[in-house]
Image (tube, helix red, strand yellow):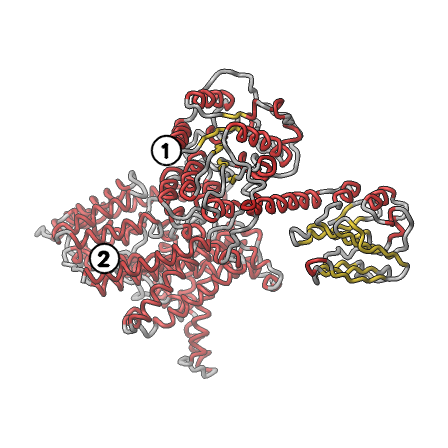
């Protein structure tokens, strides 16, 4: 009877566990960092990268693999995620090493300053929830999370079961190829606007917190064991950011001096970008997104410098002209176009906006039903001239339509009565442009059957990116030169 | 250690497996150790209280029995009364100290304030020891039973301590009698597959009631009752209905987990609920709701007061006293007194109006055996019980009165303008709450005529396993538990 109970009970529990394990990934929140981890750890294997970029958000927004590629032909992956503590980084690297053989591993050491035993649960979940079950994940859970959270890490279903009401198609069939062209990099465009208050003049040293220090040495040991070159870096940030934090070292500058000593003792380069602003032309005001993270412009500068360092100090092949790496060039182009599209959608000045439309990948459709209001608008007209439209030079009737493709004007017409034109452009892209000054539903700009125009009276522009295969922006300029989206 | 905590889900299997693994003569010791560990996981220092209550009533029992054997009857009765009084008084004293002292001083202050006297009274804010009302009542019941000669005094302190502290029923009952439970500690409970399975099924049903239904309903209930000034009309009406089912599923869920856990180990704990919302009168409701407390109050309060075998006035007085004590037992607050009082008034009024009702039925020739009439009775009883629960759940008597006043406001638009889903539960959770209530009512309905565990065991293995696995997954998926939740303690463990 006891045997029967054990047998049946075990089968029952086994089935339930099986279902729970199966449901775990479905119920887990699909945060944006998920995709880079899956791509970098499990999908693009087989020596896909020469360099691994590891760390927290400072690395995530600091080193752009596309810059390393474009300028030096170095293949790399940015594995960093927001709030990733140094112990978690260690296990991410170990997991990555199961499927990759990196020549160089660059580790950002911002989180070395954490004095608390554990990082923020949400941030750690960003990583561990998206790691497949393995010895590394097991060790990471035991070493990087408090014991009262272990069950929820081992069985994410326990934590996320309440998402039953939020499940979407992407939870069941996530597109793990999402944004792979970024290679894990992500930074904003805003500018911080303030100088750093860090005091970097000190030459004194202070201790590294015991736990993070252990992991610093674990990285060194791992590099020897696995045979990769290790580079430590410290991304630009304002050291005063953490001065009110209770679980952070009080004087990061001194701690990083200690890191420099340890690195030197172990023959490991330590690039502290906080001491190199002049050397790399880094302007904290304009190159930072906020006091802790670089913006795209700052990341470009630091990435360029790091790339040069890697190129000068390690035998890293330039793959740019290698046909096997042609996808890297395509990804670079998509990344550049995506960035350009982001800048376009953020732009509020019509002068700058029109200048940004000069892009060979853009189809620009214009539709206006009250152009006579814009005939005296010199700012607009100057811009239209620059992109080759006649409307920049001469007055037009109320109804105005223009289409530009590949920087060439495909059509430009003006009339006092309504207009409607349809075009079929390359790759079967259909475009219908219509306007009428006595129809309130006009102007209309339809691409591949979808309406993208705001439908408001004014100067409507819709921008379609042929490389990204999507409309990247739709605006309506009013007679006061205000851009409305 | 809550029944719904991960700790209990580890604790219970270990206790149960070892219980069967060790020789019979040590089993009660193992259960005693486990029960005290269970209690200490909540508070180590308050274990002293339960131990004190145990020792006092244990000695009280022995002394009463000893006094019983004294040949001088007069002296014997005198001593028995003294020992019983001392045992009960000390136990009630501890209960009073930890549960009612602040309420007592507050009430004095209020009374003085009516006469424009302002006095400063102390405020102790003592933490209410877990399950104190339950084990105190059980201990007092034991003393009275020994005093009356209904039960022998237990000689073994350890076994008596287990009777008081047996972990499945420790925090919220059932309130057991020594003659029903004590002998079970000496019985040999061998491992019986079907009994263990039945016990686990009962526990699973308890978990469903608690984490699928009660804890979901609690989200809306807490929102409305914690901020009653923000709600009116149907919002309060819905919250009161939700609380009516929350408290039932919470307490019945606890009891089923307790009874199921005991059953796994071969113990039979008393029934505490028998489909209470199918009751056709308030009197019947109390025969179906918290049955062991009702029996306790009947046997140790109502009947000693004279019960119904006295004048009408005295009978009504006895009912009112019993229900006011019941109200106070649930909590030290005017709202609990009002709740108890309301139930007393319901019964007294019901009795007083009985001739009118009979006349009305005869006059209009109403067939009282018809389904429609019975349904009408069930609905009226439900409404009365539901109304009283408002006083029970409200943070204070004043807030309860405010809610009752605000309830009479006609705002049917809340069902269409989306504000229904702004009371803490979004539309999907609200719908799941309603489904939960429906499932409870449906199962209760089936339980009228069938023992569902027996019915299930008659089905073939495939059907049974599909039910087990689907049930477990429904519970795990839609249950309100886990780190994302601020889990709800069992309501009755506060009493």
Answer with left or right where residue B277 lies relative to residue A328: left
Which chain's residue wears label 2? B
Would residue A180 be visible to someone looking at this image? yes
Residue A225 badge: 1
Q: Nearer the viewer, residue B329 or A446?
A: A446
Q: Nearer the viewer, residue A110 or B40?
A: A110
Q: Nearer the viewer, residue B404 or A89?
A: A89
Which image quarter is the N terminus of chain A in? bottom left
User: Please, what secondary structure does the residue beneath circle 2 have?
Assistant: loop
Seen in the picture, residue A383 relative to B372 is either above or below; the reply is above
Q: Which residue sits furthest top?
A: A203
Q: Which residue sits furthest front?
A: A322
Residue B177 badge: 2
Pointer 1 and pointer 2 on the same chain: no
As measured in the structure, the alpha-carbon distance from the residue carrying label 1 to the one carrying label 2 is 69 Å
Would residue A247 be visible to someone looking at this image? no
Residue located 25% across and 57% down the image? B262
**Where residue A295 sits in the image (x, y, percent)?**
62, 35
Circle 1 packing at 10 Å, graded few (<14), some (14-19), many (20+), is few
């Amino acid at each position: 009877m006891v045997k029967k109970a054990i047998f049946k009970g075990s089968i029952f529990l086994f089935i339930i566990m099986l279902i729970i394990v199966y449901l775990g990934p479905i119920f887990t929140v699909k945060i944006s960092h998920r995709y880079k981890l899956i791509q970098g750890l499990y999908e693009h294997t087989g020596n896909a990268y020469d360099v691994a970029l590891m760390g927290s958000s400072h690395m995530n927004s600091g080193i752009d693999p596309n810059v390393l590629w474009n300028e030096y032909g170095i293949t790399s992956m940015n594995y960093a995620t927001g709030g990733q503590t140094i112990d978690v980084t260690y296990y991410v690297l170990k997991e990555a090493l199961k499927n990759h053989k990196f020549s160089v591993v660059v580790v950002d050491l911002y989180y070395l300053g954490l004095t608390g035993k554990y990082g923020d649960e949400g941030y750690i979940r960003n990583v561990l929830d998206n790691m497949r079950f393995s010895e590394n994940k097991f060790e990471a859970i035991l070493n990087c999370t408090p014991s009262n959270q272990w069950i929820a890490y081992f069985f994410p279903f326990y934590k996320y079961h309440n998402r039953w009401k939020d499940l979407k198609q992407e939870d069941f069939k996530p597109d793990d190829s999402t944004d792979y062209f970024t290679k894990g990099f992500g930074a904003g465009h805003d500018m911080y606007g303030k100088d750093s208050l860090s005091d970097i003049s000190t030459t004194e040293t202070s201790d590294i917190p015991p736990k993070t220090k252990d992991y610093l040495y674990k990285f060194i040991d791992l590099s020897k064991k696995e045979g990769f070159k290790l580079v430590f870096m410290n991304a630009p940030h304002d050291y005063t950011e953490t001065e009110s934090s209770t679980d952070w070292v009080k004087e990061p500058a001194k701690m990083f001096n200690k890191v420099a000593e340890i690195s030197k003792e172990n023959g490991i380069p330590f690039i502290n970008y906080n001491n190199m602003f002049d050397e790399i032309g880094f302007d904290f005001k304009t190159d930072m997104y906020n006091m802790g993270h670089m913006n795209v412009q700052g990341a470009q500068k630091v990435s360029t410098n790091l790339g040069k360092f890697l190129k000068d100090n390690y035998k890293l092949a330039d793959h740019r002209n290698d046909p096997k790496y042609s996808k890297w060039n395509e990804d670079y182009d998509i990344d550049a176009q995506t960035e350009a599209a982001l800048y376009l959608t953020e732009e509020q000045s019509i002068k700058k906006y029109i200048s940004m439309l000069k892009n060979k990948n853009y189809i620009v459709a214009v539709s206006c039903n009250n152009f006579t209001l814009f005939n005296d608008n010199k700012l607009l007209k100057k811009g239209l001239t620059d992109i080759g439209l006649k409307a920049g030079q001469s007055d037009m009737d109320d109804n105005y339509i223009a289409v530009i493709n590949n920087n060439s004007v495909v059509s430009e017409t003006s009339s006092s009565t309504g207009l409607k034109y349809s075009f079929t452009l390359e790759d079967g892209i259909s475009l219908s442009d219509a306007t009428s000054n006595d129809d309130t539903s006009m102007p209309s700009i339809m691409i591949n059957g979808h309406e993208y125009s705001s439908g408001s009276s004014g100067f409507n522009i819709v921008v379609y990116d042929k490389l990204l295969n999507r409309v990247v922006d739709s605006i309506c300029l009013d007679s006061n030169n205000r851009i409305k989206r | 250690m809550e029944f719904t905590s991960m700790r209990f889900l580890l604790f219970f299997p270990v206790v149960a497996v070892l219980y069967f693994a060790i020789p019979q003569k040590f089993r009660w010791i193992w259960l005693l150790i486990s029960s005290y560990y269970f209690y200490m996981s909540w508070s180590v220092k308050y274990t002293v209280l339960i131990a004190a209550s145990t020792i006092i009533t244990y000695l009280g029992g022995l002394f009463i029995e000893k006094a019983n054997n004294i040949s001088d009857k007069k002296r014997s009765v005198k001593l028995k009364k003294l020992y019983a009084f001392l045992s009960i008084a000390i136990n009630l004293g501890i209960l009073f100290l930890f549960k009612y002292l602040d309420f007592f001083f507050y009430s004095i202050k209020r009374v003085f304030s009516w006469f424009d006297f302002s006095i400063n009274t102390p405020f102790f804010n003592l933490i209410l020891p877990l399950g104190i009302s339950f084990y105190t009542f059980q201990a007092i019941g034991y003393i009275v039973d020994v005093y009356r000669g209904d039960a022998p005094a237990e000689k073994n302190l350890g076994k008596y301590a287990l009777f008081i502290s047996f972990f499945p029923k420790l925090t919220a009952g059932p309130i057991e009698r020594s003659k029903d439970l004590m002998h079970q500690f000496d019985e040999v409970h061998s491992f019986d597959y079907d009994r263990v399975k039945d016990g686990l099924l009962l526990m699973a049903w308890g978990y469903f009631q608690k984490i699928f239904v009660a804890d979901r309903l609690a989200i809306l209930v807490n929102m409305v009752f914690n901020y009653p000034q923000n709600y009116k009309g149907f919002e309060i009406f819905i919250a009161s209905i939700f609380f009516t089912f929350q408290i039932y599923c919470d307490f019945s869920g606890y009891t089923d987990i307790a009874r199921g856990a005991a059953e796994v180990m071969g113990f039979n704990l008393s029934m505490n609920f028998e489909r209470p919302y199918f009751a056709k009168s308030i009197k019947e409701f109390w025969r179906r709701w918290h049955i062991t407390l009702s029996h306790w109050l009947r046997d140790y309060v109502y009947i000693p007061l004279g019960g119904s075998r006295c004048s009408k006035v005295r009978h009504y007085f006895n009912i009112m006293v019993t229900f006011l004590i019941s109200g106070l037992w649930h909590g030290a607050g005017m709202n609990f007194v009002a709740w108890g009082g309301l139930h007393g008034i319901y019964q007294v009024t019901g009795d007083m109006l009985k001739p009118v009702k009979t006349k009305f039925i005869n006059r209009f020739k109403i067939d009282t055996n018809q389904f429609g009439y019975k349904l009408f009775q069930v609905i009226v009883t439900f409404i009365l019980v539901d109304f009283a629960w408002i006083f029970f759940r409200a943070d204070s008597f004043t807030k309860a009165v405010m809610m009752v006043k605000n309830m009479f406001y006609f705002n049917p638009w809340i069902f269409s303008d989306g504000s229904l889903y702004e009371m803490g539960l979004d539309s999907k959770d609200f719908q799941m709450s309603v489904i939960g209530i429906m499932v409870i009512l449906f199962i209760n309905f089936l339980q009228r005529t069938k023992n569902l565990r027996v019915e299930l065991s008659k089905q073939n293995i495939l059907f049974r396993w599909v039910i087990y696995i689907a049930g477990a997954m429904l519970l795990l998926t839609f249950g309100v538990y886990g780190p994302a939740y601020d889990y709800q303690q069992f309501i009755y463990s506060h009493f």
